[in-house]
Image (spheres, helix red, strand yellow):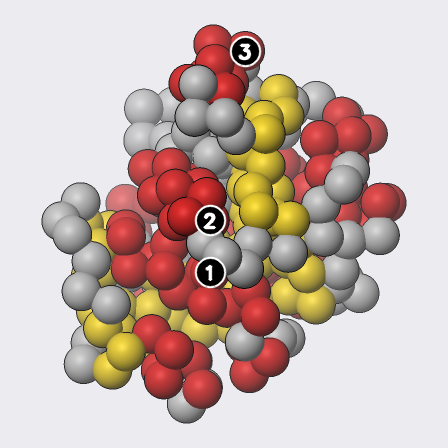
Amino acid sequence: MNVLVVGANGQVGKLLVNQLRDSQEHTVKAMVRREEQAEAFKKLDLEVAVACLEQSVEDIAQAARGCNAIVFTAGSGRHTGYDKTLLIDLDGAVKTIEAAEKVGIKRFIMVSAIQAHRRENWNEKMLPYYAAKYYADKMLEQSELTYTIIRPGGLLSEPGTGMITAAEDIRSGRIPREDVATTIIHSLTEENTYYQSFDLVSGGVPVSEALKLL
């Protein structure tokens, strides 16, 4: 697959782009917000699209043309207000779903947050963020796209182990960002993840096997 990574300049996004670049199975296009961000990817000889999630659906669709899968791993970040959470994590995600439909891309992977599907378990300090994730995920589930929603636990910067636990309902846990990226890549073509949503934390089962157990 030729995969558009939305949020390629983020921490998970960068790891994912690197893994896709080294993959024998896939190619990658990195979508970033600013031209100066694009330069770093161009130096790695990677295809780059510059588009902002606050712009139009057509701008995102233009970035996605030529791809046949999208991974949405963008986020407004910890240091912005809840207005940006609404515009990026919710509306930006929905615009990307609409862009995929517009250009005929069917495969779509959303990186969400652990327990985003259960309001009663949302982190009290991050309620607007969880609300944005909840409704973006709902919009994806109601689309005609072949979706997978991955809800990772607390993100760690340490090296990945390749060992995870993936299930429909995991109350808490943490996971290296590298293992999230690995799970995304395996999910791209693992049909057992199609039309599935799951929580993801570190565990004792290799990624490829864990996804087959969903």
Q: Determine which of the numbered discs, if any, sits on residue 20 in the image.
A: 2
The residue that label 1 is drawn on is: 185
- Residue 99 seen in the figure: yes
Could you tell me how far apart the alpha carbons at marks 3 and 1 are, in whole angstroms? Answer: 26 Å
State the residue at coordinates (71%, 45%).
67
Q: Determine whether the residue tagged by mark 2 lies in a helix, strand or loop.
A: helix
Query: Whole-percent x and y of residue 61?
Result: 78, 35
Query: Whole-percent x and y of residue 197?
Result: 51, 72
Name which quarter of the figure residue 154 lies in: bottom left
Q: Label 3: how many residues lie within 10 Å, few (<14), some (14-19) or many (20+)?
A: few
Could you tell me how far apart the alpha carbons at marks 2 and 3 are, in whole angstroms? Answer: 21 Å
The residue that label 3 is drawn on is: 35
> Which marked residue is nearer to the observer: mark 2 or mark 3?
2
Q: Are marks 3 and 1 in contact (CB under 8 Å)?
A: no
Closer to the chain start, of discs 2 and 3, is 2
Q: Residue furthest left?
A: 158
